Amino acid sequence: MSVYQTHTTDVLVIGAGLAGERTAIEAATHGLDVIILSLVPPRRSHSTAAQGGMQASLGNCAMGYGDNPDIHFEDTVKGSDWGCDQDVARLFANTAPIAVRQMAYWGVPWNRVVAGRKKLPDGREIEDLKEYEGLITARDFGGTAKWRTCYTSDGTGHTLQYTMDSIVIKMGITVHDRMEAIALIHDGERCYGAVARCLRTGQLHAYLARSTVIATGGYGRLYGVSTNAVINEGSGMFLALETGVVPLGNMEAVQFHPTGMVPVGILITEGARGDGGYLLDKNLHRFMPDYEPKKKELASRDVVSRRMIQHIRKGYGVESKWGPHLWLDIRHLGRKHIYTNLREIASICKNFAGIDPAEDLIPVRPTQHYSMGGVRTNIDGHAYGLKGLFAVGEAACWDLHGFNRLGGNSLAETIVAGMVVGKKVAEYTLGAALDCPFKLVDEHVKRQENRINDLISGRLGSENVYELRKQMEDTLMEYVGIFRNGPDLQKAVDKLQELYRRSLRLGLRSSGKYASPELASALRLPGMIRLALCIAYGALNRTESRGSHAREDYPYRDDVNWLKRTLAYWPPGAELPVLKYEPVKITELPPGDRGYGESSAANAAKSGNHTQENKR
């Protein structure tokens, strides 16, 4: 019999970022006992790194007057390139104003309206009215018709996470940090909790719960360069996939943020462009108006990223030992603005590049940033395939974002989904019993013990986890990036299949005892490669371009054949995911022109007449 510690609770939340903690708070508000598991202390969660803001249609600032949930809904659907669930988008847009005001009540120090006339960097003059002074203000973000991104300078995630964690502490919610879930406990029909490994001691624990919530964030670290924290390895997604019955939705939808700082890949917030920053090429020419005369630097992220790469391909990139990049220029915003509203950016630039953004240009290049795909759930956050399993935040395909997420909608989603899904978790839990068979728990723990023993002993092989991981990262970077095509995607699938087979024959170089980072990496790697295969294989089979999924050999959106969501399953013993599809339900806004980007015929004609080559 295995020796392990068992914990029982009403609700188990895996992940202590904003989505996980907000869900836990909602469940605890209904009188339920909650345990949160986290790889790191909650205030070190990746949510803390979010900079720019949280979208909510408050309409308090001059450029936001007249905003309402209908406009926010329309922006979200267009931003998703009609790939989102419109019922979810409607629920989200209606709830976001409530969520942002609640966070203010809990203590988030939102930037506020200051009345008076102001001159924008582009020369426009606006006036914030006295009657709105002191209310929550907003900044401009890409793909939006109104300014609605509420913010706290450029540290919005930081203030939200610290505030949220203070409520968790105040409510006495239990948090077990340095604890990693390595398998879900289930019988093929219902989820009963998770097997976890203590990252301090290496000991195994069984957590049993009436409801289990995956809130582990994204999979950015599957790619070699990402804005994501090192803990963002898609763990909750591959735990769900490994059940064989829970699908992942739209895994081919990978967002690249236009402004990752070169070479480190750290995020330079969209707020820098929202506040008036420009993108420049090697000739210090502001090129985005040539491609997007209306939206300029504030088209949606997928569009701006593609335009940047197109411009680099034309030879206008700045050459460096890390490859070509472009410049972000915020110098004209002034030192006072930069060191007040963009102070974290200033600190990052100084600490990681040795530059002062009030005086110097910032080297930037599109960088992997966000996963629109994740554990497929219904509007209540309940995962497909297993009763008692929920998912929330970036780990979930709720599906608010479709094939492209608008900036500011992710922070908003963590809070809104935490409220909505947390309530549904509570309703489900109050009607569920904790009747997990002991034999089932013991079988799942024993299976993980055997995995660990096999790795330590080297019984299955001697493949090096770090070498295989590097090859996986390089494969995704090279073949499954911003622009995709059939031959490259096939190369990626073939290579990843080879790596997956090899990952089943890992052996350790270290003892594997106690904390053992090598053992932790070896336990994760097969699941990470499965996720990589879901991304590459889903992209290979989707023969259209939609949002962030840009196929050079299929350059147009195909609503006739592809207005549907990819569902990737991984049956036991498989070497490739099984792909199924479900229709995208259109409830309010039928597919049309986004109003920006390559899909707009008028815009394409303009960009053809105003390219930099024709100006010279």
Image: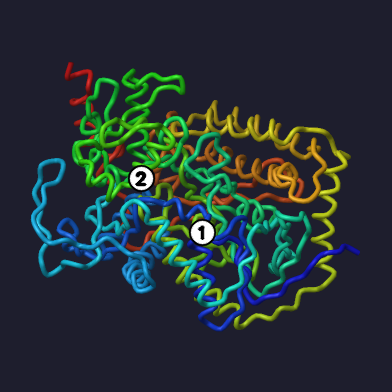
Residue 109 got which mark? none
Q: Secondary structure at mark 2?
A: loop
Q: Which amino acid lies under the numbered mark 1 shown in the image of this protein?
A: Arg
Is the residue marked by circle 2 packed among few (<14), some (14-19), or many (20+) residues within 10 Å?
many
The correct choice, above or below, for 371 with respect to 481 in the image is below
Give the side of residue 364 with respect to residue 169, left or right: left
Q: Earlier in the sequence, mark 1 or mark 2?
A: 1
Q: Are marks 1 and 2 in contact (CB under 8 Å)?
A: no
Residue at 44% x, 56% y is 584
The residue indicated by pointer 2 is 269
Q: Nearer the viewer, residue 382 or 323?
A: 323
Q: Is residue 608 visible?
A: yes
Q: Which amino acid lies under the numbered mark 2 shown in the image of this protein?
A: Thr
Query: Nearer the viewer's eye, disc 1 or disc 2?
Result: 1
The residue indicated by pointer 1 is 43
The correct choice, above or below, for 228 with respect to 446 in the image is above
Residue 289, by quadrant, is top left
Is the residue marked by circle 1 packed among few (<14), some (14-19), or many (20+) residues within 10 Å?
many
Spatial distance from mark 1 to mark 2, Cα to Cα? 20 Å
Residue at 35% x, 58% y is 54
Residue 177, by quadrant, is bottom right
Give the side of residue 99 with respect to residue 425, left or right: left
